[in-house]
Image (cartoon, grey):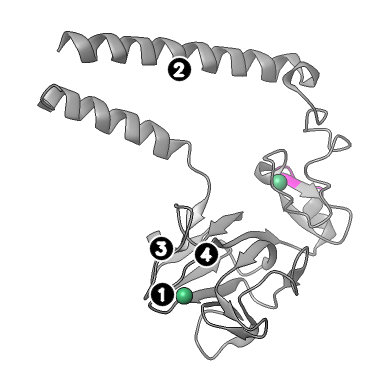
Amino acid sequence: MGVITSRRATLLLFVLLQMSVCETTEYLEDNCGESIVSYGGRLESQRYATYRNNFQCDVILEAPNEEYKLIIQYDYIDLEYFDDTSCVDYIEIRDGDSYSSNLLLRDCTQDAVEGYYYELTSHKVMVRMVTDESITSRGFSLTFTAVTFNHSDCTNDGMFDCGNDYCIINDLTCDGIDNCANNQDEIDNNKNCPVVGPDIDKPDRDRGVNIATDAVTTVLISLMATYWFEW
Ligand SMILES: [Ca+2]
Ligand SMILES: [Ca+2]
């Protein structure tokens, strides 16, 4: 095994930075006590397969301005419970940014909430997770989206009309996440999206970008592998 030289360490750091640039999902455990200000995205409990024991953490998800309201959709909730009725570990969702804000959910299984979503009255939501000293599980994954109900906004550049009273920013279309709560931002009648299917169905412009990106990535990896062994 070779020694990790400073140049190799720099190369590793470069690779890790490239990976982080591609990251779109936020993780609760990385943002304890923080606010995540965004027009939309995905929040998951942790990066790894299972969550931590003895864990208490909350984050505030916040739309960039107060004209927006947040909607929350659950992908899954899978935390330890006892006897099918009592949550041992749990997630809390509050309609606002404090512990006194209206409690929307305190739960540990997705049975009651699968496919369900909340429409908040504010532009902030507190997400909190509490676990005990043993037994972990998969955790949770949710999607949050800032929406406006003003239909004149939908016609503005940079906005997308979901067709269900929601307008979202255009950047949230065609990203593989159902931000509209009816999937209109992801299906092919959205003029911005390629037809759902393999790459061959995508517009030439997107295929060209993908091919170019793949080529650059391949060259970079080849160069890095070469330098690694030469050092
Ligand atoms: Ca537990
Ligand atoms: Ca989307």
Assess disc 3: are there few (<14), some (14-19) or many (≥20) residues with their C-alpha within 10 Å of its C-alpha: some
CA–CA distance between discs 1 and 3?
A: 17 Å
Query: Disc 4 beta carbon < 8 A from ligand 1?
Result: yes
Q: Is residue 125 above or below residue 147?
A: below
Q: Which residue is mark 4?
A: 137
Give the residue at x 58% y 72%.
Answer: 124
The residue identified by callout 2 is: 217
Q: Residue 215 at what x, y percent from top left? A: 51, 11
Answer with mark 3 or mark 4, whichever residue precedes in sequence. 3
Of residues 122 and 56, the one nearer the viewer is 56
The residue to which callout 1 is attached is: 134
Q: Earlier in the sequence, mark 4 or mark 2?
A: 4
| Residue placed under numbered mark 3 in the picture | 29
Magenta stretch, residue numbers: 155-159
Callout 1: 10 Å neighbours few (<14), some, many (20+)? few
Q: Quadrant of residue 38?
A: bottom right
Residue 137 screen position, x and y as percent: 52, 64
SS state under label 4? loop
State the separation of the CA atoms marked 3 and 4: 15 Å
Task: Give the residue displayed 53% in from the left and 16% down from the top.
Answer: 214
Instruction: Please indicate whether residue 15 sits to the left or right of residue 185 in the image.
Output: left
The kind of residue on which mark 4 rests is Ser
